[in-house]
């Protein structure tokens, strides 16, 4: 894969690899995301996992900003608590600008993974490959019940913002609903991992057209129509893999609320 990377990304991969190799506390460098899924281009992020000796983990975590600065011209960085991943350091380098994720894990953390990473460097390649071979690898797809337990609450919450005239809030809730529910369910229909709305345009067809109907203009009538379209699309996608128990009074109760909000 590395031979097909854009020059900027290839240079950065080599810099990070060199920094890992020079630090005896670090045992391996792995890559995920577009690096392994394909579709990598000049706009792509670099997603690295830095594997740390268990006994050095606390020390490395306390100094990870220093590692990030050694890897290039670091402009800004923050940790990933907002996505439930405090081990992650999200970085912006440049110019030219490049987004880089650095996740620091213990070797013992490699037993459960969401994807099989590419190995960019390992002090003991055979041991690392054996550990990856034995790992439980599964994308964290949501179940039909997970969607059903949340969908109507989120749709109603967004509808309350519309009823108050808080259009920016309502429009933001539609974006959230696409990311958390409609996009993943559309990926599910296509037999793909539920990756939000990531590259969902590539699916084409009526599903993408349905999703586009949930994009409103800055107008209350348009926002209501987008919420009603989101209700219809959820019901259509739900039929692929129904939950064990549908929520009572839905969709009629949400539709009535939306229709009464104007």
Image: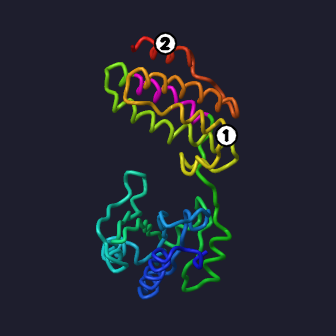
* Residue 221, above or below 205: above
List x then y, in percent, for residue 113: 58, 61
Q: Is residue 155 magenta?
A: yes
- Residue 241 drawn in magenta: no
Which sits in the foreground, 29 or 2? 2
Q: Residues within 10 Å of mark 1 (few under 14, many from 20)?
A: few
Residue located at (61% from left, 83% from top): 125
Q: Which residues fall within the magenta stretch?
A: 145-159
Q: Are marks 2 and 1 in contact (CB under 8 Å)?
A: no
Find numbered disc 1 in the image and state the secondary structure of the residue it sits on.
Answer: helix
For the image, the number of numbered tags is 2
For the residue pair 220 and 127, the one nearer the viewer reads as: 220
Task: Categorize mark 2 by other alpha carbons within 10 Å: few (<14), some (14-19), many (20+).
Answer: few
Q: Which of 7 and 185 lies nearest the eye of the viewer?
A: 7
Question: Of the numbered discs in the image, which one, if any, rests on residue 256?
Answer: 2
**Quadrant housing residue 176:** top left
- Select label 2 or label 1 by which is in front: 1
**What is the secondary structure assignment of the residue under circle 2?**
helix
Q: Main secondary structure of the magenta part?
A: helix
Q: Is residue 241 left or right of residue 106?
A: right
Describe residue 229's horizontal placement relative to residue 16 as left or right.
right
Q: Which residue is mark 1?
A: 205
């Amino acid at each position: 894969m590395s031979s097909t990377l854009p020059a900027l990304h290839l240079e950065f991969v080599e810099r990070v690899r060199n920094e890992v190799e020079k630090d005896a506390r670090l045992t391996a460098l792995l890559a995920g995301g577009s690096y392994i899924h394909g579709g990598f281009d000049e706009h792509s992020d670099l997603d690295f996992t830095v594997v740390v000796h268990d006994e050095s983990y606390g020390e490395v975590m306390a100094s990870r900003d220093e590692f990030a600065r050694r890897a290039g011209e670091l402009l800004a960085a923050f940790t990933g608590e907002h996505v439930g991943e405090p081990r992650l350091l999200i970085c912006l380098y440049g110019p030219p600008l490049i987004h880089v994720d650095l996740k620091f894990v213990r070797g013992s953390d490699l037993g459960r993974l969401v994807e099989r990473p590419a190995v960019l460097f390992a002090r003991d390649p055979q041991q690392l490959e054996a550990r990856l071979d034995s790992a439980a690898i599964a994308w964290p797809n949501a179940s039909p019940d997970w969607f059903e337990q949340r969908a109507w609450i989120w749709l109603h919450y967004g509808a309350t913002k519309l009823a108050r005239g808080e259009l920016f809030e309502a429009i933001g809730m539609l974006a959230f609903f696409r990311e958390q529910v409609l996009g993943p369910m559309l990926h599910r229909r296509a037999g793909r991992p539920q990756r939000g709305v990531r590259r969902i345009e590539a699916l084409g067809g009526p599903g993408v057209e349905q999703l586009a109907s949930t994009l409103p203009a800055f107008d209350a009538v348009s926002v209501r129509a987008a919420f009603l379209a989101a209700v219809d699309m959820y019901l259509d996608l739900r039929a692929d893999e129904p939950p064990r128990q549908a929520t009572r009074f839905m969709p009629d109760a949400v539709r009535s609320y939306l229709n009464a909000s104007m």
